[in-house]
Amino acid sequence: MSELTTAVDSPDTAPPGTGSAALRAALDAAARVLGEDRVARAADDAERSRLLGPNTSLFRSRRVAAVLRPTTAEQVREIVELFSREPDSGSLHAVSTGRNWGLGSREPAQDDVVVLDLGGLDRVRTLDLDAGWAVVEPGVTQGQLSRLLSHTPRLVNVTVSAAETSVVGNALDRGVGMRGQRTEDLVGLEVVLPGGETVRVGWWPTAGRTAPVYPHGLGPSALPLFVQSNLGVVTAAVIRLAPRPETVRVTRLSFPAPALAEVTDAVRRWVAQGLTRGVPRIYDPAAGQAYGGAEGEYLVHLPVDGTAEAVEALTGILTAEARRTGLFTDISATDGSDPSHPNHEVTRLVERAYAGDPDITDTLFRVKMGVGADKIDTAAGFLFFLPLLPFTGEAVAHADRLLREAAAETGVRLSATLHLLGPDLIDCVVAMKFPHEEEAAERAHRALDLLYASFAEAGFTPYRLDIDHAGQRDALSVDAAAVALTRRLKAVLDPNNAIAPGRYR
């Protein structure tokens, strides 16, 4: 998914109207930089709400003054400088590939901004397989990068989303891949600051440099400032490439709903003791259907990788541990290796994803969404809610009750996948699918509002926001003074609000 800049501005910050003379002058200057064919301007108010096209979540279409499509980092620098000159020049909302599905797609959080579409910056600038890094631009997709790494000793940490989603955009929004949180893959960023200055923060390759990849450097690190941030526009990133495991296998476990808390605690022990690798997952019955889960039962994926001997040993230990609990109705570690097994194909796709190979044909994505990636914004209804949970059976059972209550009250189909991010933390991915029409969308958005309220009351706060809940950042912040600090930084770096408010205001 693809949001690249989001806001730390105060909630009452608003961009100038689309009739501003300074905005028109900035757009004229941008057309001279890019060429008129790479500038889409709205002719009237009605067209401003249609310029980006539909979004899968059926969020209200924001009014957009124009869409700018640069193809180089230098063009981005010139454009940011243009929009930094005056307060009335307008504000830029940057996207990468625009596939931020479920949270807003390409839509900004506010009206009357200018969309800076970075999909044309699609180069893998440098690749170092020995040291394990790649310099990629925002338009580079996980399918594109993984194809370059095919049959090499390195891999990219892919997600289960479509192959044509942005690596950089998803990492900047704290997405989660099959092998861990994607923020951990970010080791350096090239950022255009308001005013047009380009800086490189974290670790960055230079000619003749022999220093190992280490993102923190000396003194305070500026790298985290540009994650879920509108302090600059990212034009490239250094992405860490992990060593490719020799063997990958996924153990599949099924269990009934009443065992959810006990299973969670059992799986936590296995994760804490290092019996599984990457990001193990627990799917509720709705989410598990796409992965061949049994009707009405939860499904667990426990990945193991390493040498063939290590994988064989750990798989044997996991299956033995699972049998000893007596909690599971089915235990299998052979689905991916046995072509005759009914779940062979889906398990092989999952194992390949853990090995860094995305589902290039989007087979699982189509099963889950009902349509291909090219049609999701026009033909599918889809929302995301993304809270964090403590890794305890009690917390997971509580979250499950809240999901069932929201589904019962609204009639909306919810599915939940638990990404197990270590022994203490769970990323709970709640997906809401609905027919792509107004009445169904209203019910889905009502369910989303209920989840924001009930999960916050339980202390389960989201780590990513959609465009309609941008104001939640203040309410969910641990310390108001910390939010105020980011706003002081924004005022210093971007006094004319060249970069638009977004989901993290």
Image (tube, rainbow, N blue to C red):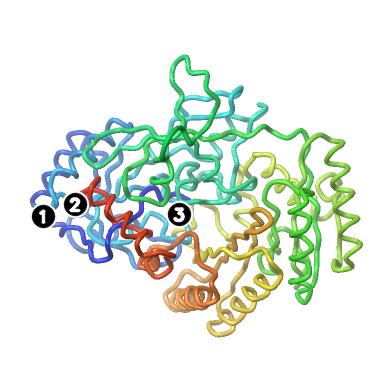
> Along the horizontal axis of the image, is 114 left or right of 220?
left
Horizontal side, residue 234 vs residue 447: left or right: left
| Distance from Cα at disc 1 to Cα at disc 2 | 8 Å
* Nearer the observer, 243 or 346: 243
| Quadrant in the picture for residue 157 | top right
Which of pointers 2 and 3 lies earlier in the amino acid sequence? 2
Residue at disc 2, secondary structure = loop
Q: Of all residues shown, which one is farthest toward the left?
A: 21
Residue, far bottom: 409
Q: Is residue 294 above or below residue 488?
A: below
Q: Position of residue 426 (x, y in %)?
A: 62, 60
Secondary structure category for the residue under label 1: loop
Image quadrant holding the C terminus, namely: bottom left
Q: Secondary structure at mark 3?
A: loop
Does residue 405 appear in this view?
yes
Identify whether 53 is placed above or below 353. below
Nearer to me, 84 or 147: 84
Q: Which residue is mark 1?
A: 20
Q: Is residue 121 visible?
A: no
Residue closer to the observer: 327 or 293? 327
**Residue 212 image position (x, y, % from top left):** 55, 25
Measured as percent of width and height from the top left, residue 188 is found at: 45, 35
Q: Would you say the residues marked 1 and 2 are in contact, meaning their CB atoms lie under 8 Å apart?
A: yes
Q: Residues within 10 Å of mark 1 (few under 14, many from 20)?
A: few
Three-letter amino acid code at disc 3?
Answer: Asn
Mark 2: few/some/many CA within 10 Å (<14, 14-19, 20+): many
- Dot 3, how many residues are within 10 Å of its Cα: few (below 14), some (14-19), or many (20+)? many
- The residue indicated by pointer 2 is 90
Residue 402, quarter of the rendered image: bottom right
Identify residue for label 3: 100
Q: Earlier in the sequence, mark 1 or mark 3?
A: 1
